[in-house]
Image: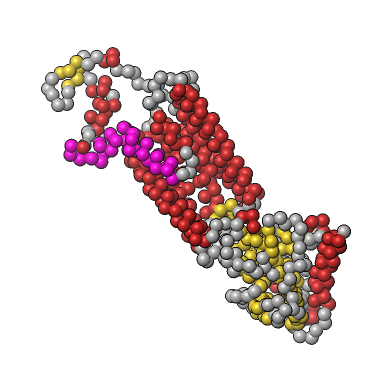
Amino acid sequence: MFCFSCCSSWKSILKTTEEMGYKVTYTERNTSLVTTSLVLLVTRPDPSTFGGLAFGVTSYSRGGDLQVNIQENPFRKALASVFLPKSLKKFLGIEHSDPDKHSRIQFKFFGTASLFVDESLKEERLNTYVVSASIENTSVQNLREPVTVTLQHIHQNVGNAAVHCVFWDFQKNNGLGGWNRSGCEMEYTEMNYTICFCNHLTHFGVLLDLSRTETDASQDRALTLLSYAGCGASSLFLGITLVTYLALEKLRRDNPSKILLNLCASLLMLNMLFLTNSWLSSFHQPGLCVTVAVLLHYSLLAAFTWMCLESVHFYLALVKVFNVYVPKYILKCCLAGWGIPGIIITVVLVINKDFYGSGSHSESNPFSSFCWIEENIVFYISVVAYVFLVLLTNTAMFITVLLQIHSVKSRTQKRSGFWKQGFLQDVKRFFIFVFHCLMKEEVAKQCRVHFCWGRFHLSDYSAEVHDNPSAALPEGGETRHPCSPRILPMDTGLHSPQKARFFH
């Protein structure tokens, strides 16, 4: 009962301060009321010349005087400021020629957070003073040109914790009021202050998310540099693998090689987007950041999808060996590998494109600027759940194939293919290069045919004879040794027939 009465009284105080400013009579265009913890400023601008207006508190100490300023341009440095864009002139009564009928704008600054207590917050706290802006007899919402709110942190964000731009919602918590993120997004943040963009007018603040406190700047920088080094090295090996298979046409004739090419392409795209993400987000262009975040999300899902398709292919090749025919097999794999991630991304964009954006920015740690998914629920559903499903499928396929190999006496064939069950580690990309380029006999032969000279060179004819000795047989079943004039008889019946091809 006591809490309810207190919250009700605080709500009435906020309503009273809102109405008080518009009821004050004054002769000048601007009037202000300044106390030790509250600033109220009311102004009646000329709509015909309105090009934007900024209100700011430049200094404040508890129990001391507040310094308040109003100007046409945004404040470069202030304890708390609000900049109203030029597009708000239509709300100021521009159709009236009488100045007394022009709408007034009210700014308020609260030097205490006791009026804004949200009992529903568990792991967040208000880390700024509260500032508000409103226009007389007008509800301003869904602005195309956002309101810029700059708020200095009460306590420095030394741990680089996540921050959220919020406004005070009087209807939240059954009418008791509470903080709401709708319509506000964080544009920039550092250790000392945060800049927010909001599409409406009300009371603004910044919440510090204690549940997502990150490592300190030095550790974050070291870990990020290590990640960049690993991604750079893995990108190099993936690039070599792609170039090798694309340059040598004979290597990419079979289905496993085609699946490998798509997997390498998705992993390389993922690595390159990760390496360039911070640089692209440093331009502070929301559209560019959303595009980068979407592409990064897509490439991540595509990489895991192709890993799953590769494990399914191993299952079909090693377990379901016979009586398996899938028409247009590679085409269907491509539709699944590149199409399923596209469907997921499209659904997320249709629901709300603002799910993508830039994370926490910091001048002391430039690597913290990153374009990615901002909403936790979207991340858990479209990334974590999807990855878990792929891991579960791959684990089931892997165990099934291992049991199949265990039941067969010969275990040596195609063992290297199972190393590719690792996921998104840089070692995985290196193993792809090692097993599919360095250790694969066909790759070595093709490299000797196309890239080697002298005694290391292997003619294309010799490679074909090595792969298919019967191709060099003259009529009668005999062949001539390349280094001797003797005729060597060959028993063609000893040659095993070519393997039947599946999954065309």
Residue at 72%, 57% (x, y): give it.
Answer: 121
Whether residue 344 is visible here, answered yes or no, is no
x, y percent for residue 330 = 46, 33
Residue at 33%, 35% (x, y): give it.
Answer: 439
Instruction: Tell me where the magenta segment starts and ends, as one range.
Output: 426-455
x, y percent for residue 207 = 67, 62
Quarter of the image for residue 463 reads top left
- Position of residue 345 in the picture relative to residue 316 (left or right): right
x, y percent for residue 243 = 35, 43
From this view, report whether residue 344 is shown above or below residue 502.
below
From this view, report whether residue 469 is shown above or below residue 385.
above
Residue at 79%, 56% (x, y): give it.
Answer: 173
Which residue is at the front of the view, 461 or 273? 273
Which residue is at the front of the view, 266 or 154? 154
Q: Is residue 12 magenta?
A: no
Residue at 52%, 54% (x, y): give it.
Answer: 292
Quarter of the figure with the C terminus: top left
From this view, report whether residue 25 is shown above or below residue 246.
below
Quarter of the figure with the N terminus: bottom right
- Position of residue 89 in the picture relative to residue 457 (left or right): right
What type of secondary structure mainly makes up the magenta span?
helix
Q: Is residue 428 magenta?
A: yes
Report the colour scheme.
secondary structure
| Residue found at the far left of this picture | 485
